[in-house]
Amino acid sequence: MAGSTQSFKIPLFDGKINFMIWQSIIQDLLVQQGLDQALEDERAISINETEWTKIQRMTVSMIRLALALGIKHNMLKETTSKALWEKLENIYASKSLT
């Protein structure tokens, strides 16, 4: 549908829901917002530093907005989306597999 906007209910990650499912939802959301490149290891050559900084801030914000307060509190020091994403994975991905 051209010109329509879709609304998605994003579950807050609270450590109780399955991290892998939540992670997949957030990745899909980042793709829809055009921010998925922020999770790459390096900035694409076609993106200048100013734009990269803006993409990083927007992506970190988007991920944090989907975290419950108790989880978010432990993620406030992370300033890049890659570092935030990896910290979440290190803590919660293995718990979701068991």
Image (cartoon, grey):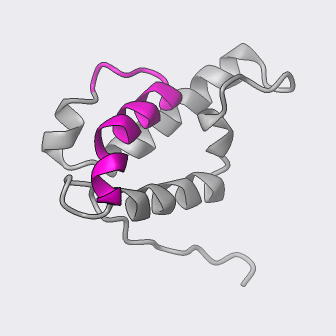
| Residue 83 to residue 62: above or below | above
Residue 70 % position (x, y): 13, 42
Q: Residue furthest front?
A: 98
Residue 43 % position (x, y): 73, 23
Q: Residue furthest top?
A: 49
Residue 45 % position (x, y): 85, 21
Judging depth in this view, the residue of 57 and 44 nearest the camera is 44
Q: How many marks?
A: 0
| Residue 66 to residue 21: above or below | above
| Residue 98 to residue 35: above or below | below
Residue 83 counted in the magenta span: yes
> Which residue is depicted at the point 31% across and 65% down?
11
| Image: magenta residue range | 76-98
Left or right of 29 on screen, residue 23: left
Residue 55 counted in the magenta span: no
Q: Quadrant of the C terminus?
A: bottom left
**Residue 74 falls in which quadrant of the image?**
top left
Left or right of 75 on screen, residue 48: right
Residue 3 % position (x, y): 70, 75
Q: Main secondary structure of the magenta part?
A: helix
Judging depth in this view, the residue of 75 and 59 nearest the camera is 75
Judging depth in this view, the residue of 53 and 83 nearest the camera is 83
**Residue 2 falls in which quadrant of the image?**
bottom right
**Residue 48 falls in which quadrant of the image?**
top right
Q: Quadrant of the N terminus?
A: bottom right
Q: Residue furthest left?
A: 70
> Which residue is depicted at the point 66% across and 33% down?
40
Q: Residue furthest bottom?
A: 1
> Which residue is depicted at the point 33% across and 52% down?
66
